[in-house]
Image: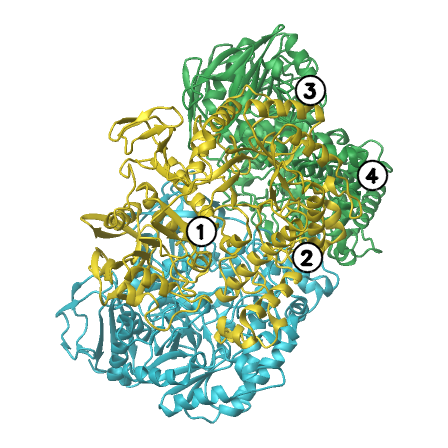
Chain colours: A cyan, B yellow, C green
Amino acid sequence: MIGYGGDYNPEQWPREVWDRDYEAFGLAEINTVTLGVFAWAHLQPAEDTHDFSTLDAIVDRATAGGRRIVLATPSGAMPPWLAHAYPDACRVDFEGRRHVYGQRHNACPSSPDFRRLSVALAGRLAERYGDNPAIVAWHVGNEYGGACYCPLCAAAFRRWLRERHGDLDGLNRAWHTTFWSHTFTDWEQVQPPTALSEHWRGPNHTAFQGITLDYRRFLSDALLGGFVAEKAAIREHVPDTPVTTNLMGLYQPVDYHRWAPHLDFASWDNYPPEDPSAARTAARMALAHGLVRGLRGGRPFWVMEQTPSVTASRDVNAVKRPGVLRLWSWQSVAHGADAVLYFQLRQSRGACEKYHGAVLDHAGRTGTRVFREVAALGREFARVGAELTGARTPARVALLVDWDSWWAVEMSDGPNRNVRYLDVLTAYHRALWQANAALDVVPVTADLSGYDVVVAPLLHVVKGDVTERVTAFVERGGAFVTTALSGRVDEDDNAFLDDGPFASLLGLWVEETDARQPDVVNPVALFGAEHAARHVFEVVVVEDAEVLGAYGADFYAGSPAVTRAARGRGSAWYAATLLDDAGVAALVRAVLDEHGLAGPLADVPDVEVAERVGADGTRWLYVLNHGPRRVVRCPVAGVDVLSGRELAVGGELVLEAVDVLVVRVAADA
Amino acid sequence: MIGYGGDYNPEQWPREVWDRDYEAFGLAEINTVTLGVFAWAHLQPAEDTHDFSTLDAIVDRATAGGRRIVLATPSGAMPPWLAHAYPDACRVDFEGRRHVYGQRHNACPSSPDFRRLSVALAGRLAERYGDNPAIVAWHVGNEYGGACYCPLCAAAFRRWLRERHGDLDGLNRAWHTTFWSHTFTDWEQVQPPTALSEHWRGPNHTAFQGITLDYRRFLSDALLGGFVAEKAAIREHVPDTPVTTNLMGLYQPVDYHRWAPHLDFASWDNYPPEDPSAARTAARMALAHGLVRGLRGGRPFWVMEQTPSVTASRDVNAVKRPGVLRLWSWQSVAHGADAVLYFQLRQSRGACEKYHGAVLDHAGRTGTRVFREVAALGREFARVGAELTGARTPARVALLVDWDSWWAVEMSDGPNRNVRYLDVLTAYHRALWQANAALDVVPVTADLSGYDVVVAPLLHVVKGDVTERVTAFVERGGAFVTTALSGRVDEDDNAFLDDGPFASLLGLWVEETDARQPDVVNPVALFGAEHAARHVFEVVVVEDAEVLGAYGADFYAGSPAVTRAARGRGSAWYAATLLDDAGVAALVRAVLDEHGLAGPLADVPDVEVAERVGADGTRWLYVLNHGPRRVVRCPVAGVDVLSGRELAVGGELVLEAVDVLVVRVAADA
Amino acid sequence: MIGYGGDYNPEQWPREVWDRDYEAFGLAEINTVTLGVFAWAHLQPAEDTHDFSTLDAIVDRATAGGRRIVLATPSGAMPPWLAHAYPDACRVDFEGRRHVYGQRHNACPSSPDFRRLSVALAGRLAERYGDNPAIVAWHVGNEYGGACYCPLCAAAFRRWLRERHGDLDGLNRAWHTTFWSHTFTDWEQVQPPTALSEHWRGPNHTAFQGITLDYRRFLSDALLGGFVAEKAAIREHVPDTPVTTNLMGLYQPVDYHRWAPHLDFASWDNYPPEDPSAARTAARMALAHGLVRGLRGGRPFWVMEQTPSVTASRDVNAVKRPGVLRLWSWQSVAHGADAVLYFQLRQSRGACEKYHGAVLDHAGRTGTRVFREVAALGREFARVGAELTGARTPARVALLVDWDSWWAVEMSDGPNRNVRYLDVLTAYHRALWQANAALDVVPVTADLSGYDVVVAPLLHVVKGDVTERVTAFVERGGAFVTTALSGRVDEDDNAFLDDGPFASLLGLWVEETDARQPDVVNPVALFGAEHAARHVFEVVVVEDAEVLGAYGADFYAGSPAVTRAARGRGSAWYAATLLDDAGVAALVRAVLDEHGLAGPLADVPDVEVAERVGADGTRWLYVLNHGPRRVVRCPVAGVDVLSGRELAVGGELVLEAVDVLVVRVAADA
C-alpha cells in the first residue's frame, strides 16, 4: 500500500466537521494521517498540567476510521508559557538579538529547559499512545533548522570543540589562528561566529572559515541532539515503531548525512522552488528524492509533505497546473517513496498558512479541481500501489553530495562569490537525470565499490580517506568526474601545501584561478561543440592527462579546460571551469557512454525514466513526461500497470503531457 | 478668503530679518502663518523652566501684521533634556532596539512622562495664547506616525487587547492560536509583533496576521491618544477655536478613519511621490484630497503643507516646473481646500531641511522664480478667493478605502506579495478621476444611501455590517464594483468557512486563486477590447451572474474574469483579477455610463474637472490641465473667475498647459 | 634602490620553509620585508607575559639575509585575551551593537585599556629592536579605519566638541539646533549619531549634518590618537627611523589630511576596485598616488601593499593579466613611489586570505607565471632603480581634495543622492590625467602660489581662508575651476545667507538647483560639441562672466551651464551641472590649453606620461601604455633606461600593450 494522506489538525475545528472530513478522506482513499504536529499548547497548557483529551479524541477518530497514524511530538513549536517561563529557551540570532516568543522552530537547541520539557512530553505521548497499532510511525519535531548563537550555545560549542580538537593547540592549528593574531589561550575566549564577531555582510562572510565551519557542524549536531533525545524517550515505551522526522531535501543549514544514522526511515517535505522550467523543477525534485533515499542506504522513504495546490510562503504562489500533482506524486514513487502525504488535509483558517493549499479548502468542498485530482490519484494509488512498494533502486552511478563543501565553497573569500554549490551540483545532476541514468546520491564517506561512475562537483573539502577510496575506485575501472575548486582544502578549510590530494589522480595541478563577472564567457571546445564557461577559470598544468577541451579566450586561451586521465582500468575527468548546461551534459554523457550507463529515452527531452526493482527481480519502469506530448519508441516490453496496456519493445508509445506510465517488466524479461 | 501662507520659524533668525520677511509676505498676500511647530526647546529649556518670550515676540509680530495664526503645540519633536531625563520616552524599534535622542516624531506614545509633559505644555500654550483672536486654529504635534515596540507599549497593547477581545478565549479565537501551538494562557505572554517575535523579512511578514493587525490598530490608537490628550488640555482654555493636526494623505501606518471623529477639521501635507506621469501625480493628489475631505463628511479641509519648489528628503529632488505650483494649489481648492499653506516660508539654514524649498531662500530674495510664482498665486487667491471658500462637493460615486484591508492584504502570506493595496486603489481611482466623476472617498462604515456607484477595490477584510449595507445599496439601484481578493477574511483576518460574504451578491464563489510573476500576462477580453491581467487570477464558479470578460490563457482560459450580477434594481460587478489601467478604465467607465455619472470632458486626456457648490447653489467648475495645450468644447456656460471671460456651452475653449479655469455657473443655469 | 618585497608572516610556517622562502626572495631580488603586522598573540600571549623568541628569529633571519626590514606594531589586530579581559575594547557599531572578539581593525579608539596595552607593546618592540640597522621604517598598526559609537567614544566626542565649539552656545549655533527643538542644554545630552539617534537608512542619512560631520572628524582624530601614541612610544627608543602607517588611498572614513603631519613618510595599499576600463583603473590609481604623495609635500612615498595577482575579498577576484603587475608597479614609481611592496610574500594557509595572491603560493612554487613576473620585475628594479629614487614631481596644476566636502555632499538631504564625490572628483581627474598634465593632489589648505591651474570639483564646504586664497590665486593669473554644489556651506554645514563665498569670483549666483533621475540628460553645447549633463542642474544668474555653454533642454534651456569669469590676470570657471566625461574633458582641456599645461602625448588614448625630476635636473619621463599597441612620435630626446634605447624627439615610438618606457632626459636637454 502506498501511504496517502497528510497533516491533519482537527483541533482547529468543531467535531461535526471531523466527520465530514473523514467522509471526504474516504472519497480520496486517504489511508494515513499525521497528527499532533503542533499540539503542545493543548497537550500541556501549563508546565504542570497535561490534557490529552483532545488528542485522545483525534487519535480515536482516526483509529476508528481504520487509518494509519503518524504521531508527532509537538516540539516544532513551543507554547507561549514555555518562552515566558524560560526566556533563554528562545534563540539569539546571527545579529546577536535575543528573540522572544513567536513563530515556530524557535527553540534554542542548547536550552536545558526546552530539552527537558520536550523530551518529557515525547515520553508521555509514547507512554500513552505507544501501543496503538494504528500508529505506523513517530514523527519527532518538524523541519529542524535555523540557528542559535546564545550563551548556552556558546558554552555547548566550546564543549563540542574540546571534543573535536582535544586541546587549544589543536583548535588553534585547525583554525589557523596565527593569522590575524587569533591564538586562543582560554576556551572562554571562543565566541560563536556572528555579525558581532567574525562576520560581515552576513553568514557567508567570515574572517575565519574554520570557526564558521565548525559552528555549522555544531549547530547541525545540536539540533540532532534534540531529535535523538526525544527518540530515546519514545523508545523507552515504543520498542519497534519507526521514528523519523521530516527533512527538507536540499537544505543547507543541516547536514543530513550527520543525521542519517539516527533516522529509522527517511522522509522529507517536497516544496520545489518556483522555476519557469518544468524539467529543471523535476530534476531538482529527483535530486532531492535521491539524496533522501541515499540517507538510509537506498531503502524506501516517505514524502511527508507536499502541497496539493499552492504554497503560501512564497512571494508569488502559483497553483499546480492540472495533472502536475499526479505527475509529481508518481515521480516520488518512481524514486523510491512508499508514501506520498500532503500538507495539509484541511486548510487553516487563520495566520500565515491560511492560504496554503489543502485537500479540503476552507469550505470543505469536494467538488473543486484540487479535491478531484487528489481523489483520483488516491484511487489510482489504491488500485495499483500494493505491488509497487518496497522495491529498490539499483544504480551504477553515484553523485557525491557534501555539506562541508557546500558550506566551505560558499563562505570562501575568493575566488568568486557567484559560485553556488547547488548551481553546480544541480547542473551535473541534470545532465545525469536527462540521460535517465540510474543514480544514487551519496555522501563522500559512501562505499563506492558498487559504482561505475562517480560524479563529484565542487568537492572542495577533502576529508577522511576519500582520496584513497576514489583512487582505488578508478584503478579498478571506475570513472571519477570532478570540477574546478575541488580538492582545495582539508576538513578545517586549510589549503593544501602541495599540488593537492587529487593532483596525481587527475594528472594536473592548478597554477592560477581566474574569476570573472557573470557576463564574461570563455568558450570551451569539447567533443566538437563550443560551450560557454563562466565564473571560475583554473589555469592548470597537465602532467599526465588527455586534454579534451581548451579555453578559447583570454591570456590562457589554448590551455586545458577539460581533461581525462587514464588510471589503472579507469579514468579521472576534470572540468577546470564551470561549464554551461550543454557543456556539462556533453561531458557527463561522454562518461556515461563509456560505461553504457545512459538510461532509456536518454535523448528525449523532458521525459524522465526511473526504475525500481522488486525482491523477485520484477522491474517497474516509471516513465514521466514533464514536457509536451511526444511519441517515442517503447524501450522495454511490459505492462503499464496504470492503463493495463501491453507494451512491446520498439512499439510506438504516446506520452501525453504530464502523463505517467508504470511499466512492469517481468524478472525474466 | 483662501488661507495662504505656511510654516514660519523665525526663532532661527535675528529680529531684523523678521521685518524683511513680513515685507515679503505682504508682496505675496500671505495671510496665515503656522507658528511654534518645533518650539519645545525654547519654550521649556528644562523641565522646571518655561520661557515664552521668544514665542510671545513671534506671535506679537504676526498679530501686529494682521495675519491669521495657526498655533502649534511642539510635541512633534521633544527636546534633548526630555530624552535624557526619561530614556523610555524614546521608542524601541521593530528590531527591538531602544533609541536615544535624535530626529523628531520619536516619542513613545505610551510613555507616561512624555504624555504628561507634552500635555502640560499644550495646556500652558492654550492658557497663554488662547484668547488671541488672530489664532484661527490649533495644530497639535506634527505628522503623527511611526511605531514603537517598547515594554510600555507592550503593556498598553495588552490593556487594549483586553478591551477588544474581553478574555483570553476571545483573544485566542481571534488570533486562531490553535495554529502553531500559540494558545496564550496569560496576558503577560503576549509580545508586540516584531523582528524578534512573529516577524521575518520585515513588518509585512508575520506568522500571525491577527496579532500584527491588532498591533497596527493599537499603534494608531496610541498615537491618537496623544492628540486627544493635548486637545483636551487645549479645550480647557480654548472653548471654540478648531483643533487639528497635519495628516499625511495616503499614509499606511495610521488609520485616519479612527482619527477622524477627533479632528475639528481635517488638514494634510501634500508631497506627492515623484512620478514621471503628471496625470498619475495629479490623480494621486486628487485621491488624497478626497480621502482627507471624506474624513469630516465632505467639509472643506486645509492643505497644511506643500513645498513651493523642491523637497529635500527624496533621493532626487526636482524643482516644480513653472506653473505647477499654481496648478496644484488650485487643484487643492478644487477638491475642497479652503487653505493652501507652504512648508516653509523661510528656508532653514542647517540640518536635513536646509535644501527643502521655501518661499524665501537663504538669502531672502524676492526676485526668484519661486517667489514670483508664490506671490502671483497669492495675489490671485486674494483677488478671487472670497467667493470660493466654504463650498461643498456633492458626489454620487463613492470610493471605499479601508486601512484594515490595506494592512491585511499586504501582510498576507499568499497569494502574491506583489499585490499592493495602493496600486489597485489608485488604478480604480484613476479611472474615476479620468472620467471626471464627482467622487467621495469614504470608509466602509460610511452611509451609502447617497450614492449610485460604490467602488471597493481589494476590500479584503469584511467587518461590521458592510455586507448588509452594500447589498441594500445594490437592491435599491446602486452599482457595486469590487475586485479579486475582496471578501476574504473577517476583521481578525480569519478566512470565511463558506463561499464568503459577497458570494450571493456577486453570484459566484472563488474556487482557486492563481498567482504569477509580474511578467506573466493573461489577456482578458472586455467590451470588445483585450486587456492585460496580472498578479492574481481567481478561478471563479459563477452561480448567477453575467460574464463580461473571460481569461484568454492558461488552463482556466475561457473561465470568467469580469462579471456583472443584476440584483434588485442594481448590479454587483466583479473583476476576478487585476486588470491593467485600460482594463480598469473600461470596466469603471461602463459602470459610470450606466448611471450617467461620467463628468465633463471625461474623454480629454489629462484634463481634470472638479466642482464645488455653494450654499445658494452656485457651482464652480475647476478645469485643470495637467497635460499639453488642448482645445475643447466648453462643457458649461459661466464666467471664468480668474480671467473674467464669459464662456458659452460648446464654445471653443483653449486649455494651455498647466492652466486653470474656475468657471462660475449660476445656481439657475 | 627601489624598495621591493612585502608582508611576510613566517610564524605560520615551520623554519625549514623560511630558508626556501629566502632562496626564492633571492631569485626575485626582494630587498625589503614587512614583519610583525599581526604578531600580537605570539608577542604577548597574556597580559603579563611577553615572548619575543619568534619575532627574534624572524628578524634575525631577515637581517642575516641582508634585507631591509619594516617592523610593524601589531595593534591592527588584538589577541583574544584582550577582548575577553576588556570587553569595552571592542567596538559598538552604527546599529548600537557591542561587538565581541573577532576579525581585526576592531579596537575602540577611545578604550583606555586598548590604548595602554597597544602603546606599551609598541614601546617594548622599539626598545628591543630599535637599534637594528636593518630596520628602515616602523609601521604602526594597519589600515586604520572603521568606526565606533560606544559610551567611551561618546564621552570622548563630548570632550572633543568642547574643544572645538567652546561652550554649548557654540555647539548649538554650529549644529543649528533651533531646528527640530534640538537645543542641547547639557553636554551629557549629546549622543553619537547612529541608527538609534539621528540616522535612518544608514550612515549618510542624518537629521543633523553638523552632528554627523563632527563625529566623522572626531573619529578620524580618535583613530589618529592611537597612531600618535604608538609613535611617541617608539620615539622614546628610536630617535630617527621614520614611522608611518599604511593608508588606503581614496578612503572616505579617515581624513588623511588631518593625519599627514604625523607621518614621517606616506605609504598606502594599492588595491584598485575592479573596473572594466583599464584606463579608468589606471587613472584612479594615479589619483590615489597623487593624493598620497600630496600628504607629505610631494616627497616620495611607498606602496606598502599591492597584490601580485588576485585579491580574495571581492565578490569576484580576477587575476592580474600578464604584464599588468609590471605596468602598475612602474606606474607607482612614475608617480613618486620609492618602494613597491606586496601583500604578501607567502600565501596564508587558512582563514579569509587563503586565496589572496602571494609571491609564493601554498606550495611555494617559483615556476608559476606570478612568481616569474615578480622576479623579472625585481631584477628590472634592481638593474635600473638606483638612479630613479628620490626624484620629485613638479606640477603647475593642483587638484583640490577635501574630506569635509566628500562627507558633506554625500550626507546631504537634497538635492540628489546620486551625486557621489568620487564620481565627480575622478571625472575631473581623468580629464587631467588623459591630458598628461603634471598634477598635485592637495588639500584646500595648500599653498596655491606655485600653481597655474587649480581644479576643485564639488568644493561643497568652504572653510578657513580658502576663498581669499583662491581669489588671490586668480587675480595673479591662475585659472580656478569648480562645479555645481560648490561654495554651498560653511564648515559646520550651514548654508550661506547670501550669494555665497564664490559668487563674486565666479560672477554668478545660484537661483535654483534642479535634480533629476540618472536617466535624464540635459544636453550642454560647449566649444562646438554637445555634451550630456546629468543629476544636478543649477539655474544660475550670471552677473559678470562669459557664458561658454548653455542648457539645451527643460524650462531653463538657454540658461548658462558653463561659465568663465575673467578676474585680474586670471580666470574662474564654473560648471553649473555635472557633465559627462567628454564634457569635463573639453572643459579641462580648454583650461589647460590656456596655460600650455597639457602634457606629452595628451591626445593618445590610454597612454599615461608622468615625470620625475632629480636634484640635478635630470628628468625621467615614464610612458605607460594601458591600452593596445600604438605607434606615436617620441615627445622627448633621451634614453629609455629599461631598454637602453636612444630616443630622438619626433622619432617613431612603438608602445606595446602594457609596456613601459622610462626615458631619461638630461638636465640640459
- CA distance for labels 1 and 4: 52 Å
Assess disc 3: are there few (<14), some (14-19) or many (≥20) residues with their C-alpha within 10 Å of its C-alpha. some
- Of all residues, the one furthest to the top in this rendering is C569
Q: Nearer the viewer, mark 4 or mark 3?
A: 3
Assess disc 2: are there few (<14), some (14-19) or many (≥20) residues with their C-alpha within 10 Å of its C-alpha. many
Q: Nearer the viewer, mark 2 or mark 3?
A: 2
Report the residue marked by disc 3: C466
Report the residue marked by disc 1: A543
Do marks 2 and 4 both belong to one polypeptide chain? no
Kindly identify which chain the residue marked by label 3 belongs to: C
Q: Are marks 2 and 3 in contact (CB under 8 Å)?
A: no
* Residue type, numbered disc 3: Val
Q: Are marks 2 and 4 in contact (CB under 8 Å)?
A: no
Report the residue marked by disc 4: C234
SS of the residue under disc 1: loop
- CA distance for labels 2 and 4: 54 Å
- CA distance for labels 1 and 3: 66 Å
Report the residue marked by disc 2: B111
Do marks 4 and 3 both belong to one polypeptide chain? yes
| Corner quadrant of residue C86 | bottom right
Nearer the N terminus, badge 4 or badge 3? 4
Instruction: Give the camera-side residue of A468 and C330.
Output: C330
Q: Are marks 1 and 4 in contact (CB under 8 Å)?
A: no
Which residue corresponds to the image point at 51% horizontal and 71% vertical from the top-left?
A144
Kindly identify which chain the residue marked by label 2 belongs to: B
Q: Nearer the viewer, mark 2 or mark 1?
A: 2
